[in-house]
C-alpha cells in the first residue's frame, strides 16, 4: 500500500490517533502536513517522521477557527503543492448529562468535531478535483452509532460526521475521490486515559476481542482507505472496535 508521491493533511496530529495516522501515512511514503494547536508537539512528530526518512511539515491550526482553516490549507497547498489525502481527526469532548450541559459545551464539541471537517473538506477538495484523485477520511466513533450517556454533544458530532461522509462521497465520486469514515471503539489514548480503572474494565468487558484498541489499530485502517487498494470503497464507515458493535 504505497503512498509515494501523495500529500496528506492530518488534523489533530500532535498526539493519539492523529499522530499514529501521520506516522503510518509517512511510513507508506506520503508527505504529511501535520496540523494541531500545539506547535511544540507537532514539531516532535515531524522530527520523528523526518528522522526515520519520511517527510513532514508543521502547520499550527485551531480547527475551531474558520479563518485559520482557510489560511492554513492555503499554506499547505503553497508549500507542498497539493493535498491528496485529508484525515479529519481533530476532536474534543465536554461530557455532561443533557439536563446540565451548557450551550457553550455543545457548540464547542460540534464546531471542533463536525463543522471543522466540513470546512477542511471544503477547502481541500479543490486540489483533489483538479487532479481527479483524492481520499477524504473522517474519524468518527462507535458512540456516534450507539450513543453514550453524558455525551450527547460528542455522539451527535460523530453521527453527523458519518452523514457528512456519505453525502460528500456521493458528491465527489465522479472525480475519482473517495470519502470514508473510520469509527473507533474504545481506544487507549490520552482522552480515555483519564477514565477511572473501573470504567475502563467495564468498557473492556463490552469488547469481544477482550482488549482496548490502540491508536495504531485505527491508523492501519486509515492507511488502507488512503491507498489504491481501497479505490472501490466510498461512503463507508469502517468499524475498528474489537467487535463492540457488529452489523
Image (spheres, grey):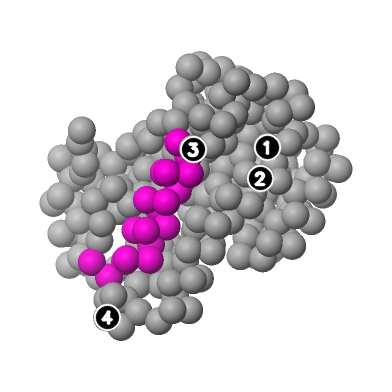
Q: Are marks 1 and 3 in contact (CB under 8 Å)?
A: no
Identify the residue position indicated by label 2 in the image: 122
Q: Are marks 3 and 4 in contact (CB under 8 Å)?
A: no
Q: Residues within 10 Å of mark 1 (few under 14, many from 20)?
A: many
Residue 55: x and y in percent read 73, 37
Asked which quadrant contains residue 122, the reply is top right
> Would you say the magenta stretch is mainly helix, strand or loop?
helix
Checking the image for residue 167, the label placed there is 3
Mark pair 1, 2: CA separation:
6 Å
Mark pair 2, 3: CA separation:
13 Å
Q: Which residues are magenta?
A: 149-166
Q: Are marks 4 and 2 in contact (CB under 8 Å)?
A: no
Mark pair 4, 2: CA separation:
34 Å
Does residue 186 show up magenta in the picture? no
Checking the image for residue 99, the label placed there is 4
170 or 150, nearer to the observer: 170
Q: Are marks 1 and 2 in contact (CB under 8 Å)?
A: yes
Tell me which numbered mark, 2 or 3, is placed earlier along the sequence.
2
Tell me which numbered mark, 4 or 2, is placed earlier along the sequence.
4
Identify the residue position indicated by label 1 in the image: 125
Mark pair 1, 4: CA separation:
39 Å
Tell me which numbered mark, 3 or 4, is placed earlier along the sequence.
4
Q: For the point 63% across and 52% down, which residue is it? A: 119
Amino acid at each position: 500500500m504505497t503512498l509515494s508521491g501523495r500529500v496528506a493533511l492530518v488534523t489533530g496530529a500532535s498526539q493519539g490517533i492523529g499522530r499514529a495516522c501521520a506516522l503510518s501515512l509517512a511510513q507508506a511514503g506520503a508527505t504529511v502536513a501535520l496540523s494541531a494547536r500545539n506547535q511544540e508537539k507537532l514539531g516532535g512528530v515531524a522530527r520523528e517522521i523526518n528522522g526515520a526518512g519520511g517527510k513532514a511539515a508543521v502547520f499550527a491550526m485551531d480547527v475551531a477557527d474558520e479563518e485559520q482553516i482557510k489560511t492554513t490549507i492555503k499554506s499547505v497547498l503553497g508549500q507542498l503543492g497539493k493535498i491528496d489525502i485529508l484525515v479529519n481527526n481533530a476532536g474534543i469532548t465536554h461530557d455532561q448529562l443533557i439536563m446540565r450541559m451548557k450551550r457553550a459545551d455543545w457548540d464547542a464539541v460540534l464546531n471542533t468535531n463536525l463543522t471543522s471537517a466540513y470546512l477542511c473538506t471544503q477547502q481541500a477538495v479543490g486540489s483533489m478535483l483538479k487532479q481527479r484523485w483524492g481520499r477524504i477520511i473522517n474519524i468518527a466513533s462507535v458512540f456516534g452509532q450507539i450513543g453514550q450517556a453524558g455525551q450527547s454533544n460528542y455522539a451527535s458530532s460523530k453521527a453527523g460526521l458519518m452523514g457528512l461522509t456519505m453525502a460528500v462521497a456521493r458528491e465527489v465520486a465522479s472525480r475519482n475521490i473517495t470519502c470514508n469514515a473510520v469509527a473507533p471503539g474504545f481506544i487507549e489514548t490520552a482522552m480515555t486515559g483519564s477514565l477511572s480503572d473501573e470504567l475502563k474494565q467495564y468498557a473492556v468487558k463490552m469488547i469481544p476481542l477482550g482488549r482496548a484498541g490502540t491508536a495504531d489499530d485505527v491508523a492501519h485502517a486509515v492507511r488502507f482507505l488512503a491507498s489504491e487498494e481501497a479505490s472501490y470503497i466510498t461512503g463507508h464507515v469502517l468499524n475498528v472496535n474489537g467487535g463492540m458493535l457488529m452489523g
